Image: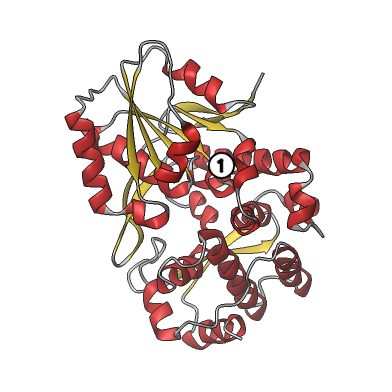
Amino acid sequence: MSEKITVSAERTYDVLLAADWRSSLRELTHNKVRCAIVTTQSMKERIGNLEAGDCEFTYCVIPDGEEGKSPAVLMQLWNWLAAAGFTRSDLIVGIGGGAVTDIAGFAAATYLRGIDWIAVPTSVAGAVDAAVGGKTGANLDYGKNLIGSFHSPLNVIVDISWFDSLSDRDFAAGLAEVVKCGFIKDPEILSLMAGCTIANLRADQGLVSDLVKRSIQVKADVVGADFTESYLRETLNYGHTFGHAVEKHAKYSLRHGECVSIGMAFMAHLQLAQGLISQEVHDLHFSILSSLDLPVTYSQGDWLELKALMSMDKKVRGNTLRFVTITEPGKCDRLEGVADSALYEAYGKVSL
């Protein structure tokens, strides 16, 4: 029997920590008339042909990665759904990484002004972050997730057997979001990960399950208290202000988690210089991230370009940059009105 974590948002739903995603999905779709599976070509081959009662499955295959989160892909999804005769009683299922569940959820939020959807994340980042919380979206040329909506899934099915197919790089990139959860709310995550390498973690499925469960619980607690990101939910974006700027500047050649890692490194330098954290907490960022072979520097950047990209961050108010900060693991705050010289100094330390 699978465990579950309940998320209370604009509606209540369960994240199923399932032993077998196929069985869980079959149970959730057997009484539906139509179900659209949004996935990528490489993932479609692994999924095969699904069957559940009298449900008719339609496969909507989109590009891999951030290319699949464009307005053009969204338009394509709308047209596929309309051509297949989807109604409000039908269902969308996103099977893939965070980019897939983001766009599948956004298509569900906007087609017929909203139909049900289920997320089946196949990556660490998708399982602990993108698929949970009801934030859906697509990218614009000017930045990531600049269009989207809040539309919670009917369920999220997390099966960690998907992780076996991930490269070490992709596995590590997802763990950046786990580390983030440790810094913002659950310090026990940091204790469990101390000294761990990718090889250690991949050999310990029990520890991975615990870290995934703890990270999902962090997000469930935060989302339940602040669904539409009025204040508390911003804490889930620790390290993301600079990280998203790096991601866009690198033209998505870096994994999202790699950019979040660089973003947390930037924040560690900035917070230490501002007297917000101790040297010990600063060093903890680098010891954990480096042991996971995650990047903590970005030397290809141009400061003025990166600063301009940071200005597109959703936490910006007027012309003022705002950063999620910590005072110690598990305790968050905000920082704004930072002098350009201080930002540039922090940038200088991650651009070495």
Q: Secondary structure at mark 1?
A: helix
The reply to whether residue 181 is visible in this rendering is yes
Which is more toward the observer, 10 or 103? 103
- On the rendered structure, is 219 left or right of 53? right
Question: In the shown orientation, is residue 311 left or right of residue 239?
Answer: left
Near-viewer residue (209 or 13): 209
Q: What quarter of the picture does the N terminus occupy?
A: top right
Q: Amino acid at mark 1?
A: Ala
- Mark 1 neighbour class, 10 Å CA radius: few under 14, some 14 to 19, many 20 or more: many
Residue 348 relative to residue 231: left or right = right
Q: How is the image coloured?
A: secondary structure
Q: Position of residue 316 (x, y in %)?
A: 39, 66
The residue that appears at 29% across and 39% down in the rendered structure is 107
Q: Closer to the camera, 186 or 79?
A: 79
The image shows residue 204, relative to residue 67, as above or below, that is above
What residue is disc 1 on? 127
Residue 64 percent across, percent down from the top left: 41, 52
Which residue is at 28% across, 65% downward? 141
